[in-house]
Image (cartoon, helix red, strand yellow):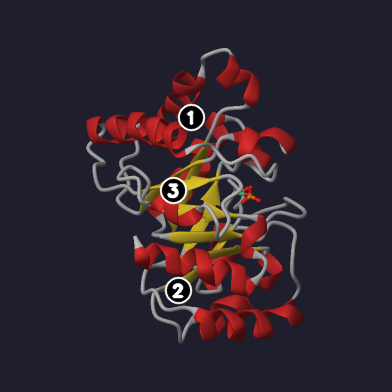
Amino acid sequence: MIAANWKLHKNINELNAYFDEFQKHITADVPAVFFTSPILLDRATQLVSSMNNISTGAQNISENTSGAFTGETSLDQVLSTGAQWALVGHSERRTLFGETDALVHKKVKLATEANLNVLLCVGESLAERESGQTEDVILRQLSLGLADLRPDNLALAYEPVWAIGTGKVATVTQASAAHKVLKAALVEMGLKDTPILYGGSVKSTNAKELLTDPYINGLLVGGASLDALEFSKIFNAARET
Ligand code: PGA
C-alpha cells in the first residue's frame, strides 16, 4: 500500500489535473490512499472512484462524534464523503496539536469500530533515537494507541520524526529494524496481517530500495506525493519490488 499525505496542500481546482496526470502514468495495481484536507475529500473521492484500488482518507478526525467543536471534522462527515481511511496519530498532530496516546486511542477506536480503516502513525524524535529510546517509544505508541483494540482494518506507519520533511530518510537498515520490532509486537497482539508502512522523506529515488525490505510493506509519502508524476513513480516502484 502506498499512501499520500497532502497535509495543508492543494485546493479543489487542482484535483482534476493531478488525478489525470497520476492515472496517465501508473502501471502498478497496488492499493493507494490519498490523505487530503477535509475540504477536498468529497471531490477527491469522486475522482478516484473509477480508479482500481485507489481510495481517500482524512488526515485527522475528531474524537467527538458531534456537538459544539468548532473547526473539527467528525467521523460521520468523513464517512459521508465515501472516504475509506483516517490517518491517526501523525507526528505533526502529536507535536503541534498536543495529541496524546490516550487521544490517539480514542480516535482509533471510533474510526475502526465504524468501519473506517485507520493508518496509525508511530515514530521517535531525534533526541529519543540518540538516547536509545526508539524501541520503547514506538512500542509505547503502538500499545497505548491500540490498548485493548485488535482491529483488522488497521495499518501502521513507522515515521521517524527526524526524517519527516527533512530530506533525511532513514536507512533501510534503520527502518527495517524498527519495522521488525513493530511486527513482533503486532504478531504478539494477534495482528500478524497488519501492514507496516515506512514514512519520512520518501522519494522516487529511494522508494524501490525501501520496498525491497521484507519488513517494509508500503510507504507513506508527504512532500513527494504533491507532484503527480513523482508520486506515480513511487507508486510504480511498488510493482517492481
Ligand atoms: P515527507 O512527509 O514525505 O514530506 O517527509 C511524510 C509524512 O509526514 O507523512
Check disc 1: other Cα within 10 Å, few if <14, some if 14-19, many if 20+. Answer: many
Neighbourhood count class around disc 3 (C-alpha, 10 Å): few under 14, some 14–19, many 20 upward: many
39 to 51, vertically: above or below: above
The picture places residue 196, in percent across and down from the top left corner, at 38, 45
Placement of 107 over or under 53, stated as above or below: above
Q: Is residue 232 above or below residue 24?
A: above
Q: Amino acid at mark 2?
A: Ile
Q: Position of residue 151 (x, y in %)?
A: 32, 47
The residue that mark 3 highlights is 210
Residue 52 showing in the rendered view: yes
> Which of these two is toward me, 85 or 230?
230
At horizontal 69% and vertical 46% (from top left) the residue drawn is 165
Of the image marks 2 and 3, the number of the one nearer the N terminus: 2
Circle 2: is it few (<14), some (14-19), or many (20+) Cα within 10 Å?
many
Nearer to us of marks 3 and 1 is 3
Q: Amino acid at mark 1?
A: Gln
Residue at position x 62%, y 38% from top? 163
Q: Quadrant of the N terminus?
A: bottom left
Q: Which mark is residue 5?
A: none
Label 2 to label 3: alpha-carbon separation: 21 Å
Which badge, 3 or 1, comes first in the chain's sequence?
A: 1
Mark 2 near mark 3, Cβ–Cβ under 8 Å?
no
User: On the rendered structure, is 118 left or right of 163?
Assistant: left
Percent coordinates x, y for residue 83 in the rendering: 51, 69
For residue 5, above or below residue 82: above
Residue designated by label 2? 54
Residue 169 x %, y %: 58, 41
Q: Amino acid at mark 3?
A: Leu
Seen as rendered, the residue at the extreme top is 131
Cα distance between the residues tagged 2 and 1: 28 Å
Secondary structure of the residue carrying numbered label 2: strand
Which label sits on residue 141? 1
